[in-house]
């Protein structure tokens, strides 16, 4: 998922649309893919940049909570799996920045906006990873929640975004399974391990539910994005689907979901559950989550410390180009 | 076998498949007279990969550009893979039921046999890349010898697997050393500072000892000093292109191969081994 509170345009009625806009909407309705060089409404382009950019930022900031345990992974196999996973996340960032570039914004511009705080990343990555079971919970719950949104986005109207999502989903579903495998080891392990697993679930449950964004009734930007097929399902639909799928998985692990109001509702064929504390969500978005300062600080530091490295490579590229030009001129 | 690493059935299947993939018979693996030296040397190879892999993985999420984050994680991943192979064989040779995980997670610093070079702190990206390059140039020369000459089929087999990745590590590190050395004024200064910092730790790669001599005699491993020529050729070629000065050979810090380390290794292990030490016997 990794895209929350994406500001979109107000929904236009058909009467308000220009001929071009009507033709565009009809293409989207027919399920055609929109490609980079084709005409698109300015609002569509801007909304996509915000959404894809936020998703890309989430992937690279998302390296940090898991990177936190790579040097402490308990076996060589677990260390290798975690490294491979975090490397995948960085790769997803790369696909997504590339998809955003096709809309006319550079990776550097997007990073500048991340570093200045103008653009956000998913609220979930502002929570700390405190024990090894968190490596399981992140895969199981965080990647699990992300997949709920990303699977439908494989059918999104913008071609490059859709193709990036197809690649990303293949890896994310693998991540979710390996996260669950870590949870199984922990939940079926020693009493201390089981305690870590329960602790991880207690801490990640509500933040995972927040990943879907505020309730539909408070989500003002959805209608236009859904018409454009940038957003496929509503926040509440996806959250419900996530809860329905996750509760039996927790039961299998013998772990308790930290919600006293969680109960099966026969009529709606789904679980009733407590809403997350939305005031906490908005505080985290504002920058007051437990790790906002560290996460963004780490990214800014990496970028700042790396300036000489990037400048050095650029200087070499210029010299090399000048040398090639001199050889050509001499011939 | 102790219960430190209780393998799941899936993991056991992976391990058994790996064992089946290596039906190569090798008389040295069960040679009692050679055992102490062979075990020690295999730990040198495995610990180099493990400790450098650990250091490299510290960069994860903190690289100067996204492509570097990916490349560093990938390199660390390769090195952890090599660790599993070398320490796995070390455990077999030792014959006391210790597997790669037990060797990695339950030995203390004095039992580690890696070069001092690989345990040095990352410093800036220049130090990290220069350390990688100086090590890769040695690593590649060493693996090449093992593939061509080692009388131990198991050793040659691991070397043949590892060299595919190490060739790429060396190519990538060389390319970046050239571009940063011959880049901006600042990148040049940082790369030269990295060379000067690390140079006293390179001599250890070419220093033989009695343990190695036994294995050289058996034709299993190269004498360390014989790798120097290839290494120097690689390094001087790349430095010339990178406009970097090769320092005069002076004092060499030694001891890693015999288990006398810098203060840094203790902290690496405190971090790396934390879970295995805090929860003995648990399966992860």
Image (spheres, rainbow, N blue to C red):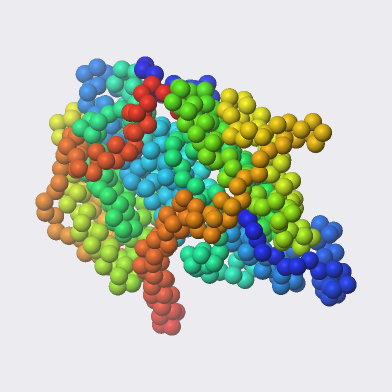
Q: Is residue B252 visible?
A: yes
Tell me the quadrant of the picture where the N terminus of chain B can be found: top left
Q: In the visual, does A31 lie left or right of A285?
A: right
Instruction: Name the quadrant containing residue B213.
Output: top left
Which residue does the image show at 41% across and 78% down from the upper left?
A322
Q: In the visual, does A268 lie left or right of A146?
A: right
Q: Residue furthest left?
A: B251
Q: Residue furthest right?
A: A15
Residue A279 point in image, percent of width and height: 59, 52
Q: Nearer the viewer, residue A225 or A106?
A: A225
Q: Which of A118 and B44 is in front in this view?
A: A118
Which residue does the image show at 51% across and 36% down from the upper left?
A200
Tell me the quadrant of the picture where the C terminus of chain B can be found: top left
Residue B39 point in image, percent of width and height: 26, 26
Residue B283 point in image, percent of width and height: 44, 24
In this rendering, is residue B46 above or below A107?
above
Q: Which of A204 and B84 is in front in this view?
A: A204
Q: In the visual, does A48 lie left or right of A204?
A: right
Instruction: Name the quadrant containing residue A35.
Output: bottom right
Q: Residue furthest bottom?
A: A329
Q: Is residue B167 visible?
A: no
Which residue does the image show at 43% across and 83% down from the upper left?
A329
Residue B157 point in image, percent of width and height: 39, 32
Q: In the visual, does A301 lie left or right of A152?
A: left
In this rendering, is residue A40 above or below B39?
below
Which residue does the image show at 36% across and 63% down from the upper left?
A305
Instruction: Name the quadrant containing residue A37.
Output: bottom right
């Amino acid at each position: 998922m990794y895209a929350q509170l994406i500001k979109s345009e107000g929904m236009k009625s058909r009467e308000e649309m220009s001929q071009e806009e009507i033709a565009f909407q009809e293409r989207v309705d027919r399920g055609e893919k929109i490609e980079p060089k084709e005409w698109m409404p300015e609002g569509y382009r801007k909304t996509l940049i915000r959404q894809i950019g936020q998703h890309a930022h989430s992937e690279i900031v998302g390296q940090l909570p898991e990177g936190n345990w790579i040097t402490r992974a308990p076996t060589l196999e677990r260390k290798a799996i975690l490294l491979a996973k975090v490397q995948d996340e960085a790769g997803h960032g790369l696909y997504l920045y590339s998809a955003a570039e096709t809309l006319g914004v550079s990776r550097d511009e997007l990073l500048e906006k991340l570093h200045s705080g103008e653009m956000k990343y998913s609220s979930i990555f502002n929570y700390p990873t405190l024990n090894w079971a968190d490596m399981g919970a992140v895969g199981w719950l965080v990647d699990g929640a992300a997949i709920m949104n990303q699977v439908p986005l494989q059918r999104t109207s913008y071609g490059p975004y859709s193709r990036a999502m197809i690649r990303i989903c293949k890896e994310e579903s693998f991540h979710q399974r390996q996260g669950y495998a870590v949870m199984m080891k922990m939940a079926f392990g020693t009493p201390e391990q089981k305690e870590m697993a329960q602790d991880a679930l207690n801490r990640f449950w509500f933040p995972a539910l927040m990943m879907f964004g505020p309730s539909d009734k408070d989500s003002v930007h959805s209608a236009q994005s859904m018409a454009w097929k940038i957003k496929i399902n509503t926040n509440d639909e996806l959250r419900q689907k996530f809860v329905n799928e996750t509760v039996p998985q927790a039961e299998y692990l013998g772990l308790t979901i930290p919600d006293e109001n969680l109960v099966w509702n026969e009529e709606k064929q789904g679980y009733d559950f407590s809403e997350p504390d939305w005031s906490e969500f908005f505080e985290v978005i504002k920058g007051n989550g437990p790790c906002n300062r560290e996460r963004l600080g780490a990214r800014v530091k990496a970028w700042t410390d790396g300036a000489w490295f990037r400048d050095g490579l650029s200087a070499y590229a210029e010299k090399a180009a000048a040398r090639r030009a001199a050889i050509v001129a001499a011939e | 076998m102790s219960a430190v690493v209780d393998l799941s059935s899936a993991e056991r299947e992976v391990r058994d498949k790996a064992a089946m993939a290596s039906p190569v018979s090798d008389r040295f693996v069960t040679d009692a007279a050679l055992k102490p030296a062979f075990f020690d040397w295999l730990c040198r190879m495995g610990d180099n990969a493990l400790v450098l892999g650990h250091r490299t993985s510290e960069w994860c999420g903190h690289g100067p550009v996204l492509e570097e984050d990916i490349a560093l994680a990938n390199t660390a991943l390769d090195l952890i893979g090599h660790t599993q192979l070398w320490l796995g064989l070390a455990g077999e040779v030792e014959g006391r039921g210790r597997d790669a995980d037990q060797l990695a997670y339950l030995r203390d610093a004095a039992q580690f046999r890696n070069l001092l070079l690989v345990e040095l702190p990352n410093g800036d990206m220049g130090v990290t890349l220069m350390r990688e390059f100086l090590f890769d140039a040695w690593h590649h020369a060493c693996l090449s010898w093992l593939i061509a000459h080692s009388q131990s089929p198991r050793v040659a087999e691991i070397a043949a697997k590892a060299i595919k990745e190490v060739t790429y590590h060396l190519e990538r590190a060389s390319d970046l050393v050239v571009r940063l050395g011959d880049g901006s004024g600042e990148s040049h200064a940082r790369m030269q500072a990295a060379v000067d910092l690390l140079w006293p730790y390179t001599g250890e790669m070419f220093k033989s000892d009695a343990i190695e001599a036994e294995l050289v005699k058996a034709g299993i491993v190269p004498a360390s000093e014989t790798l120097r020529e290839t290494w120097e050729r690689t390094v001087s070629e790349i430095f010339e292109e990178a406009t970097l000065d090769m320092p005069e050979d002076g004092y060499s810090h030694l001891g890693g191969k015999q288990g006398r380390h810098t203060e840094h290794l203790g902290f690496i292990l405190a971090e790396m081994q934390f879970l295995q030490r805090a929860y003995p016997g648990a399966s992860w």
